Image: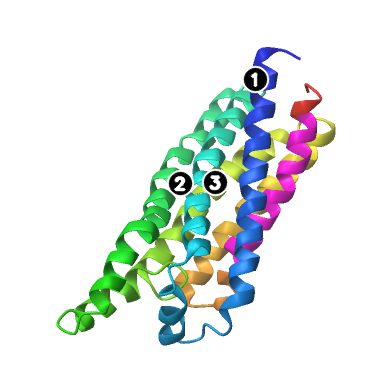
Amino acid sequence: MSARTKLFAVVSLMALIVTVIWLALLIADTARAGPLDTFEQVLAHVSNLDALYYLTYANAALTVLATTLLFSVLYLTCKTTAPELALLGFVFAPAYAAVNLVVYLSQLTVVPALLTAHQQAQHQAAAELLLQQTIQIWPGSGISFLNSLGYAILGVPSIILGAILLWRRGSLRLAGALLALNGLACVVGLIGTLAGNGLLGNGSLVGGALYLLALIPLNVAFWKGK
């Protein structure tokens, strides 16, 4: 295995590990949260600010970085087949990283500060209005929209690079199909968010699951040196 191929394999494994952790933390948080149908329920849940909360969003930020690195690897893999198209796809990856780093880092910095202000009577009303726009798990918030937008942006290179991988053989072809489906699901998720359709809005979560599945054949291909 060449040094280049080994680097590709390490990056893909890194992306797989942090994404599996993301899924595990999401399941753990969902299981303990209970109903989150109203903003009051969401606010009560987020106000815990326990270790799971911080770990979830710190890992989410790491997942964004690992994903961006992975798409750099995918660009280098695909450019031998379709250089111009691969570059067109890759240029969206840094935009995704910028948007979703703002989303997840704001949950570690801005939201805790606003929750502290919310405890003070003179700031409570203003802090609550700001929290309604900054809590990521609240579907009506501006930051939730940014989150969906970030995944939809990543959907573009997922579709383009995934389509290029369909010209390859074996595990890379399967990974390409799953990546392209992931991209389509994320775009549908943004459409659902804009339309206020909760079912379609779950497209980003479906896309995340498809992305995780795509990482498995990618790891197989890269670790085999293909």
Residue 73, percent across and down?
60, 28
The residue depicted at 64 percent of the width and 75 percent of the height is 31
Q: Is residue 215 above or below residue 210?
A: above
Tag 3 residue: 63
* Observer-nearest of 51 and 9: 51
In the image, farthest residue toward the right: 170
Q: Is the residue 114 above or below the residue 41 in the image?
A: above
- Amino acid beneath label 2: Tyr
Q: Is residue 99 left or right of residue 118?
A: right
Please say if the residues under marks 2 and 1 sit with CB atoms less than 8 Å apart: no
Distance of label 1 from label 3 (alpha carbons): 27 Å
x 44%, y 73%: residue: 48
Q: Residue furthest top?
A: 2
Q: Main secondary structure of the magenta part?
A: helix
Residue range highlighted in magenta:
203-221
| Camera-side mark, 2 or 3 | 3
Q: Quadrant of the N terminus?
A: top right
Q: CA distance from mark 2 to mark 3?
A: 12 Å
- Give the class, few, some or many, for how many residues have Cα within 10 Å of label 2's Cα (few <14, many ≥20): many
Residue labelled with disc 1: 80
For marks 2 and 1, the one nearer the N-term is: 1
Residue 96 on image: x %, y %: 45, 46
- Label 3, secondary structure: give it: helix
Tell me the amino acid under the disc marked 1: Thr
For label 2, the residue is: 96
